[in-house]
Amino acid sequence: MSARTWRGLTYGVPLAFLALFFVYPLVSIMERGLSSGDDLAAAIDVLTEPLTREVVWFTVWQAVVSTALTILIAFPASYVLGRYTFRGRGVALAVVTVPFVLPTVVVAIAFLAVLPERLERGSAAILIAHVFLNVAVVVRVVGTFWAGLDPRVSEAAATLGAGPWRSFREVTLPLLAPALAAAASIVFLFSFTSFGVVLILGGPRYSTLETEIYNQAVRMFDLRAAAVLALVQLVCVALAVWAATRLEAGLAVGGWRGREQDVLRPLRTPRERTFAAISLGALALFLGVPLAVLVERSLAVGGGHGFEAYRALGKPTNALLATPWEAVVNSIVYAGGATAIALVCGGLAAFAVAGSRRGGTRLLDGSLMLPLGASAVMLGFGFVIAFDTEPIDFRSLPWIVPVVQALVAIPFVVRIVAPTLRAIDERQREAAAVLGASPGRVRREIDLPVAGRALGVAAGFAFAISLGEFGATVFLARPDSPTLPVAIFRFLGRPGELNVGQAYALAVILMVAVALSILVIERLRRDRVSWF
C-alpha cells in the first residue's frame, strides 16, 4: 500500500464516519431548534440569562476539580499496576474498570444509599461520584503507558546519582506526561458532560449544561433554548479538546519501550508490598462499597434477601417489550459491533494522529474528541430527526445503536493508541527503511506489534463503554430490543419493589459482564501480544 493510499485511509475513513453520524444529525437538530422561534434574538436572551452563567461556571468548576481529584486518587494504583506483577493483577484491572461503564443513573442511586444524608445531594456527592466513575481512565491509560516505559532510563538516572524522587520528577514524570494529558482530557470531558450523576445527586440547586439541556428540551419543551445551550457546551468542549491536543502533542516524547515482561517485576521488599497493599486496598474500598451496595440491593426483595429479582429476569414484564435476559444479549451484540467499528475508525485515526504534527492532524484529533462533549440528549434527538427519510432512513435499523455507541468509544481508542505510537523511537523505522523495508512493511512489523497491546486495551475500553452507553441509546434502541442500561432505566422508573430489584440485578449482571470481558482481554493480550 502506497503512502498516499494509507494517508487517505487514516484520514478519510474516520472523517467520513464522523461527518455522517455525528455532524449531520447534530446540525439537523440544531437547525430545527434554532429556527423554531419567532426571532433568533431570543437565543441571545438565553445566553445572557444569569442562570446560564451560573450553569456554565458550575459545569467548568466541577469538571476541573473532578479531574484533579481523579488523577490524585488513581495515580498510586497506576504506579503499582504499571510497574509490578503479582497474583490478582488482572482481577484488579477488571474491578477498576467496572465502575466506569455502569449507567450513571445506577451509580448515582448507589451513592444516595452510601453517603450520609448531609452529603448525599450537592457538589461533594457529585465530585465523589465522578471520581468513582473515572478512576479507571487514569489507571488504565497511565498504567498501560507506564508498563511500557523502559526501566533502564530510571536506572541510568539512579546510576548518575539521582535519588528516587528526583528520578521520578525529572525522568519518569516527563515520560508519563502524554498519557497523563490524555487521561486528564478524557476525565474532564466526561465530568463536563455528566448527566445522570448531576441530575440525581445535584438536586434542584446544582445543574450542568447537559442537565439543563435535558430540562429545557424534555421538561420545558423549549428546543430553542436546548439548542443554544448545546452550542455553548460544544464550543466549551471544542476549546478544551484543542487545549488538550496541543498539550499532549507538546509533551509527547520518544524513547525506548520495554517489553511488559521486562518492565513489570515482582513486589520484592516489604516497603513495596506495603505501598501496593495500601494503594490498591484504599482504591478497592472506595470502589467496592458502592458496588457491594448494588449487589445487596439486588438481593433485598420481599422483606429479606434472596434471588427473586434474578429469577424474574426470565419472565415477561410490563416495563419492557422483551424479557430482561434478551436485553443482556442485545447489549453484548451491540457492544461487539460498536467495538469493531471503534477499532477500525479509531485505530486508523490513531496512526494519522501519531504520524504527523501538522494542523490538519490536530484538527482530526480534536474532531474525534467532540462526540465525548456533545450533548447526548441532542445527539439522540438528532438521529431521530436526521435519519427518518429516504435514502437515509436508518433510525429503525438495529445497527444504528452500535454506530452511536462507537461514536463515544472512538476517542478512547485514539487516546490510548496514539501516545503509544508516538513513543516509538523513530530510529527503528529509519533503520528498517535503510535495510530496504517498504513503508507498509515498517508499519506491519514495527508499528503494529507495538500498537497491538494498546489496541487490546482500547478494545476492552470500547466494549465496556458501549455496554454502558445510555444517553443517546435510549432514543434509538427499539422497544423490543432494549440494551441493559435502557432496561435498567425503565425498571427504575416503574413503581414496585420487584421492578427496582430487577434494575439492580441487571446492574450486577452488567458489572459481571464487564469484569469478565476485561479479564479475557487481559489474558489474550498477555498470551498473544508481545513487545519488541
Image (spheres, grey):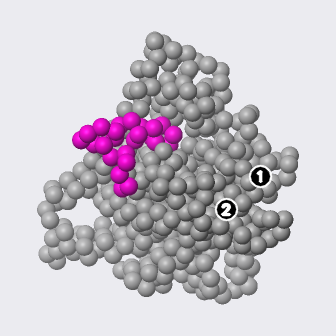
Q: Quadrant of residue 297?
A: bottom right
- Considering depth in this image, is 148 or 480 the residue closer to the camera? 480
- Residue 415 seen in render: no
The disc, 2 or 1, on the residue closer to the chain's N-terminal end is 1
Which residue is located at x 41 percent, y 40 percent?
384
Query: Is residue 508 toward the left or the right of residue 397 in the image?
Result: right
Q: Which residue is mark 1?
A: 112
Q: Which residue is mark 2?
A: 502
Characterize the local packing of mark 2: few (<14), some (14-19) or many (20 or more) Cα atoms within 10 angstroms. Answer: many
Q: Is residue 255 magenta?
A: no
Q: Quadrant of residue 95?
A: bottom right
- Considering depth in this image, is 361 or 398 the residue closer to the camera? 398
Spot occupied by residue 323 in the image (x, y as percentages of width and height): 55, 63
Characterize the local packing of mark 1: few (<14), some (14-19) or many (20 or more) Cα atoms within 10 angstroms. Answer: some
- Residue type highlighted by circle 2: Gln
Query: Is residue 40 toward the left or the right of residue 287 in the image?
Result: left
User: Does 369 sit above or below residue 156?
Assistant: above
Q: Nearer the viewer, mark 2 or mark 1?
A: 2
- Residue type highlighted by circle 1: Leu
Q: Is residue 393 magenta?
A: yes
Quadrant into which the C terminus falls: bottom left
User: Where are the magenta residues, as a range?
Assistant: 376-399
Give the structural element (helix, strand or loop) at label 2. helix
- Considering depth in this image, is 516 or 272 the residue closer to the camera? 516
Which residue is located at x 55 percent, y 75 percent?
516
Spot occupied by residue 294 in the image (x, y as percentages of width and height): 71, 64
Give the structural element (helix, strand or loop) at label 1. helix
Spot occupied by residue 495 in the image (x, y as percentages of width and height): 72, 50
The reply to whether callout 2 and callout 1 are in contact (CB within 8 Å) is: no
